[in-house]
Image (tube, rainbow, N blue to C red):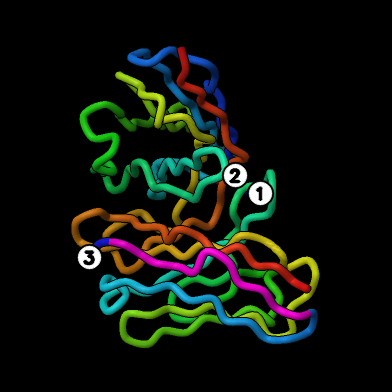
Amino acid sequence: EVQLLESGGGLVQPGGSLRLSCVASGFALSTYAVSWVRQAPGRGLEWVSALSAGTSYYADSVKGRFTISRDNSKNTLYLQMNSLRVDDTAVYYCAKLPFSDILTGYPYFDNWGQGTLVTVSS
Amino acid sequence: SSELTQDPAVSVALGQTVRITCQGDSLRNYYASWYQQKPGQAPVVVIYGKNNRPSGIPDRFSGSHSGRTASLTITGAQAEDEADYYCNSRDNTHVILFGGGTKLTVL
């Protein structure tokens, strides 16, 4: 059974940093494209970043501030978030795509974690 | 345009058919997929690609595409279908896009 378990969320001040983790089980993280998607309170889904076939992709809103990476030995995906802003407040979901290359055809997410809440506030 | 546009809210009578739409220029080139999200839960894919249902998704859910519009149709809506629905696709610049979401109310 595929499972994704996020952790690392919490309260951080504007300008601060946080690192989110997503432990995968039931599949090898290195084999598939994976992504972070966030949802601000009461708002819709927003794609944040993806890691696919060795290439990282970012939404314009986080480019230069967030870094996606993975540790294949730990089967874990990370999101390093720097220079956090109030509008980064959201539940952050880790999500898996059913293929390795995000640029092949249409990207969709077949498995999601339960999310971790990041609150940026002074 | 690199956006996907959805109606914010749609309602349907119990047992009737409802169509939820998603519009965007990128849909001329790429299929949309659809997610159902209930309060406090993670999204779940209900339709992906041209019109594919993951295992466990009832066959009352179906998808279609025409030009710059993708549609999710629920034929015979049930009370448990009340949820938020999101479309997603991609374009060449922003990689992955989500629509703003549609809140479905089953009356």
Give the magenta range.
Answer: B3-13
Question: Is residue B15 placed above or below A31 in the rendered structure?
Answer: below
> How many residues crowd around disc 2 within 10 Å: few (fewer than 14), some, or many (20 or more)?
few
Residue type at the position of mark 2: Gly
Residues packed near mark 3 inside 10 Å, few (<14), some (14 to 19) or many (20 plus): few
Q: Give the labeled residue for mark 2.
A: A26
Query: Which label number is shown at residue A1?
Result: 1
Q: Is residue B103 above or below residue A10?
A: below
- Mark 1 residue element: loop
* Residue A49 sits above or below residue A44 on the image: above
Residue B61 at x, y = what percent? 63, 78
Is residue B11 located in the magenta-colored stretch of the structure? yes
Label pair 1/2, CB-CB below 8 angstroms? yes
CA separation, marks 1 and 2? 5 Å
User: Dot 3 corresponds to which residue?
Assistant: B1
Identified at 76% across, 80% down, the residue is B13
